[in-house]
Image: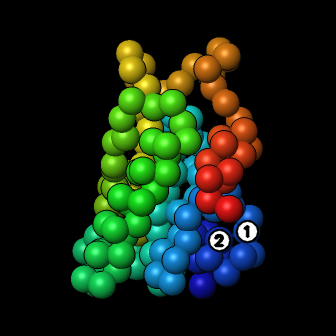
Amino acid sequence: MDCIFCKIIRGEIPSYTIYEDEQVRAFLDIQPLSNGHALIIPKKHFENLYDMDSENLKCIELASQKVAKLLKETLDCQGITRLQNNEYGQEVKHYHMHLIPRYKNKMFKVQVDGKEKLEVEEIFRKVQKSVS
Ligand code: AMP
Ligand code: ZN
């Protein structure tokens, strides 16, 4: 199937994977709204919330708790916002939940030209340390 997230699951496209189990995969967003912005997806293809089954909804919810704790433990964030687009506003048509770490006194968007913006590779190294 010509779906970018299915390709990530099959290993045809690389990803900064930070969590994985039998049903789901979590990886860093390549165009992050903040340092540590992650996506959690089911390994099985569902377009969005409307066609998800109850088993996968449960798995995503449980994984989002684990990933939220992982981000909280490894990054110096003060909160985490979850977001999930369906149809309008949904760019990738494979269900995904956004986990966006929040930093006190800052909007989602970190400074692009400022020092606060870390490269995704750098974030990956920080988060990955506690996974392996
Ligand atoms: P949405 O607008 O909710 O469909 O969000 C799609 C998200 O997927 C965006 O934040 C993109 O930056 C992200 N994205 C697209 N392609 C990739 C990829 N290959 N690896 C990681 N994140 C991606
Ligand atoms: Zn897919």
Q: Is residue 98 visible?
A: yes
What residue is shown with label 2?
Answer: 8
Q: Depth check: 49 or 26 in front?
A: 26
Report how far apart the C-alphas of labels 1 and 2 lie in the structure.
5 Å
Q: Quadrant of the C terminus?
A: bottom right
Question: Mark 1: which amino acid?
Answer: Ile
- Asked if labels 2 and 1 touch by Cβ distance under 8 angstroms, the answer is yes
Q: Is mark 2 within 8 Å of ligand 1?
A: yes
What residue is shown with label 1?
Answer: 13
Could you tell me which residue is drawn at 61 percent across and 20 percent down? 116
Q: Quadrant of residue 49?
A: bottom left
Task: Answer left or right for 46 relative to 52.
Answer: right
- The first of marks 1 and 2 along the sequence is 2
Could you tell me which residue is drawn at 66 percent across and 53 percent down? 128
The image position of residue 8, as x and y in percent, is 65, 71
The image position of residue 92, as x and y in percent, is 49, 62
Question: Mark 2: which amino acid?
Answer: Ile
Could you tell me which residue is drawn at 37 percent across and 40 percent down? 80
Badge 1 crowding class, 10 Å Cα cut-off, few under 14, some 14 to 19, many 20 or more, is few
What label does residue 102 carry, if any?
none
Badge 2 crowding class, 10 Å Cα cut-off, few under 14, some 14 to 19, many 20 or more, is some
